[in-house]
Image (cartoon, rainbow, N blue to C red):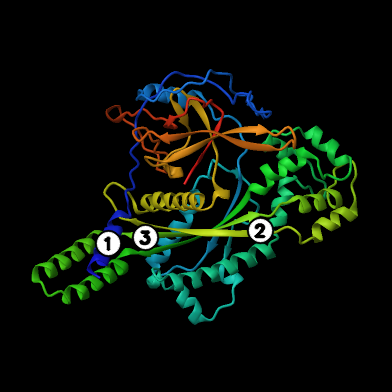
Amino acid sequence: MKHLLILQILLLLNLTIIAQNPTLTFQVGNNEEAFCHTDKITDNQSISYSNVSVLTPQTNTKEVSASTLQQITSDQPEPTYRRSSLYPILLETDPVFKEQDEVELQRLVMESYTKAPFPEKYNDHRLNEVNFRFKDYVSLSPEELAELGDEGDEGDEKKGRKKDEKYIAASERFLKEKNIAKGMVAKWFNRKADGTFDMSLIHERGSYDASAMSVQLASGSIRGMSILQDAGEELIKNTFVVINRMRFVKNEPIARAIRDIAYVTASQIKNELAQNLTVNAANIAYNLAKDGYSVWTVSYLYQLEWNDDLANNFYENMWMDESNISEERKHLFETTDIFKLNFIGFEKSKSLVLLGAGKSKEEIIEVATIRNIDRTYVKLQKAYDVFKTKTPIVSTNPIVAKIGMKEGVESGDKFEVLEMVVDKKTGLTKYATVGQIKVNKKQIWDNRYSLAVEKTEDSLQIEVNGTAFKGSKKIMAGMLIRQVK
């Protein structure tokens, strides 16, 4: 029990968020541009990018200067690549505490949520519905609602799972009643008021030939038509909803409860020295933690269902453009229930927020709330491969990608390097692994959310927009990287 208490105290201390965001400074090599090369060994064709030029592959693992890295990351934009699409939704719950000041703090958390930048590694696939109230989609007694508001049993896995099941049930009822899956499909095909569709968004996000798609659609059945199948696998299938549930609580009651448990443990220790050490450790932890607040985030992940049967049904029976308007097809789409969102899983993050000198309560809450959301997305990506993002390499000497601490990059992390190729036999896109790279621990980009800070001549720093890696010589700019477990 004593070891458990010490572990709890250490964990509590390590959760502290510092509202400051010191920018790490480091540098890189020559300014260069490149794209994925053609694979001459296999029969596959590489996908090239229009905004980069050819470069002989090379790797430089030595340390580089901050000014050079700044030049590379500022001059070289990310190549165009196919991203997953995301639709975040806020699940609103009542504040844990009913006092007026606590209700005000909950309001600040909700305001901070709306200020959060959209995750740039995903396409924005939001519809009009961006939030819903838990109470509106669940039928619970006052006692059951009170139990949900009790966060004291957060460490009880069984009780926590029962709570999450209620939130998941409410989320799925909301998704179904609001026809979110159908709305996301409609957005993919730019559905208009008259029921017509087009391929403009598919073309924009996937760089597909819109004219070739129109020819295939006009020919009838889409089975075996690679360009439409590829768009489904590459884009539509990789569409996600994340429902975020947020709570904001005072630290003092939690810190007091942990301290009181420590007191009980100390009273059972016969050795007076050990007893005093336990009490003192508990008091130190309590004094450090009691003055702040905690932001808790739970994110539930759903994926849009899309397969060959669904696609064929849609294209053959519901698709229409301006050249073949049909009331029957319009009615079929509006009344169908074939589109669904499948639950993938959920992750939780908890952050301790301590008030600090020089920062207002609003500023600290804003930074803590947004960073906590980012942490939860990182957990979802690491837990579920289907949700992992791909990021293009923008430089090879040294290897640099525009990814950093916001995406959970840490010293020692490994990434596989992928080349986007087209299988000549099927016409479908696939990703071939061509190497592996490792994060350069001295050159990790701190791109976590922070408030704008006015620089002075005495505190000028060179800002960079990427993390440096070490690894394979087969890498070329424009290739994609994806974190491995």
Q: Position of residue 476 (x, y in %)?
A: 53, 25
For residue 299, say whether it is visible.
no
Q: Which of disc 3 and disc 2 is earlier in sequence?
A: 3
Q: Which of disc 3 and disc 1 is earlier in sequence?
A: 1
Please, what secondary structure does the residue beneath circle 3 have? Answer: strand
Which of the two discs, 1 and 2, sits closer to the camera? 1
In the picture, the disc for residue 294 is 3
In the picture of the structure, the residue carrying the numbered disc 2 is 341
State the residue at coordinates (47%, 37%).
Answer: 403
Q: Which quadrant of the figure contains the N terminus?
A: bottom left
| CA distance for labels 2 and 3 | 31 Å
Mark 3 crowdedness (10 Å alpha carbons): few <14, some 14-19, many ≥20: many
Name, please, the residue furthest toward the left.
Answer: 272
| CA distance for labels 1 and 3 | 19 Å
Please, what secondary structure does the residue beneath circle 1 have? Answer: helix
Q: Position of residue 318 (x, y in %)?
A: 84, 52
| CA distance for labels 1 and 2 | 39 Å
Q: Position of residue 398 (x, y in %)?
A: 43, 24
Q: Quick check: marks 1 and 3 in contact, CB under 8 Å?
A: no
Above or below for 248 versus 400: below
Amino acid type assigned to the residue bearing label 2 in the image: Leu
Mark 2 crowdedness (10 Å alpha carbons): few <14, some 14-19, many ≥20: many
In the picture of the structure, the residue carrying the numbered disc 1 is 7
Please, what secondary structure does the residue beneath circle 2 have? Answer: strand
Amino acid type assigned to the residue bearing label 1 in the image: Leu
Q: Is residue 298 left or right of residue 169?
A: left
Of residues 200 and 136, the one nearer the viewer is 200
Of residues 438 and 234, the one nearer the viewer is 438
State the residue at coordinates (59%, 19%).
Answer: 53
Above or below for 196 versus 81: below
